[in-house]
Amino acid sequence: MASVLSDDQIDRYRTDGFLVLPGFTGLDACAALQQRATEIVEAFQPSERRTVFTTNEQERFTDAEFLDSANGMWCFFEEEAFGPDGQLRQDKSLSINKIGHAMHDLDPVFERFSYTPELAAVATDIGLTDALALQSMYIFKQPHIGGEVGCHQDATFLYTDPITVTGFWFAIEDATLENGCLWAAPGGHRTNLRKAFKRAGATNNDDDDGTVFEELDPAPLPAPTDLVPLEVEAGTLVVLHGLLPHWSDINRSTKSRHAFSLHCISAAADYPSWNWLQRSPGLPLRRLDGSGRVAA
Ligand code: FE2
């Protein structure tokens, strides 16, 4: 497969643990994804139990619906979506934090956006061999109530041995300091994984469908002020190493900050059964280059 990254870009990724590629995706493709995400939210009927998403671990809400979203297209509410009366503060279309986590294999529009020769070539260029598309998220970062995503390493949530998870984060709208852009720690991927997020049942030998964090290295993640903001325009691809500390701030502005994130792993690495995300046999993972399905 032809290379799409220059040697300089590959070197920068190895040094920094992230790479910003402006104009990687056409604005028409961004608009198509945004339109499809809007339609999915319109069709979404919230259940009695409302799943809220946060990576701030003290508050992380995990339940069966979260775990089931590995094989579906679930809408998660923003933490601040509901008022004291339990009613939505703003319209449903402005209350969803994200859709996750299998749109890339369940929805034709997301599938077309995800499985492209260009993205597969980026994965190959940075050394991610036999890339499998594991998880997709459409992130809204809504106006006024868009939630913070606390500093974390993606390998905490999607672990392989050796660590291979790589995030491909597409700006669907402009991301700025004002509406909660990404922040990253240059070189921070050359440190240990601090925590692993595990299915409680896998560690306790019981039927608990919750999740737990297991500490692997007590070294703290860098303070937010040690990270650099990645203000990018719509159409930009940001590639994130699985060990890179990164976060994004709350959005109190009037503008949303839509992004699509696809996380890939190498088929050559071991994917433990204690990972929260477990695909059902009927929905096996697919290679990013579209060359076929493999067992999860
Ligand atoms: Fe992340």
Image (cartoon, rainbow, N blue to C red):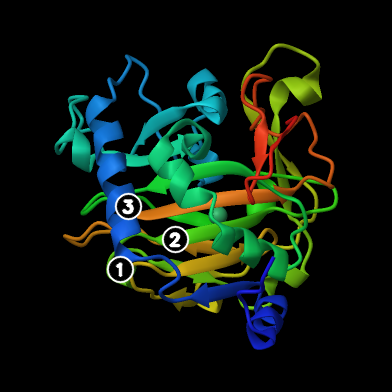
| Residue holding disc 1 | 174
Residue found at x 72% / y 77%: 14
Q: Kindly report the distance in space between the C-alpha atoms of the residues bearing marks 3 and 2.
A: 14 Å
Q: Kindly report the distance in space between the C-alpha atoms of the residues bearing marks 1 and 2.
A: 10 Å
Which quadrant does the C terminus fall into? top right
Name the residue type under label 3: Lys
Where in the figure is residue 34, as x and y percent of width and height? Answer: 29, 49
Count neighbours of disc 2 (C-alpha within 10 A) and say few if under 14, some if 14 to 19, many if 20 or more: many
Residue found at x 45% / y 76%: 229
Which of 214/91 is in front? Answer: 91
Q: Is residue 94 left or right of residue 56?
A: left
Give the secondary structure at mark 1.
Answer: loop
- Marks 1/2 in contact by CB < 8 Å: the verdict is no
Which quadrant does the N terminus fall into? bottom right
| Residue holding disc 3 | 141
**Which of marks 1 and 3 precedes in the sequence?**
3
Q: Within 8 Å: ligand 1 and the Cβ of disc 1? A: no
| Residue holding disc 2 | 170
Q: Nearer the viewer, mark 3 or mark 2?
A: 2
Name the residue type under label 2: Phe
Count neighbours of disc 3 (C-alpha within 10 A) and say few if under 14, some if 14 to 19, many if 20 or more: many
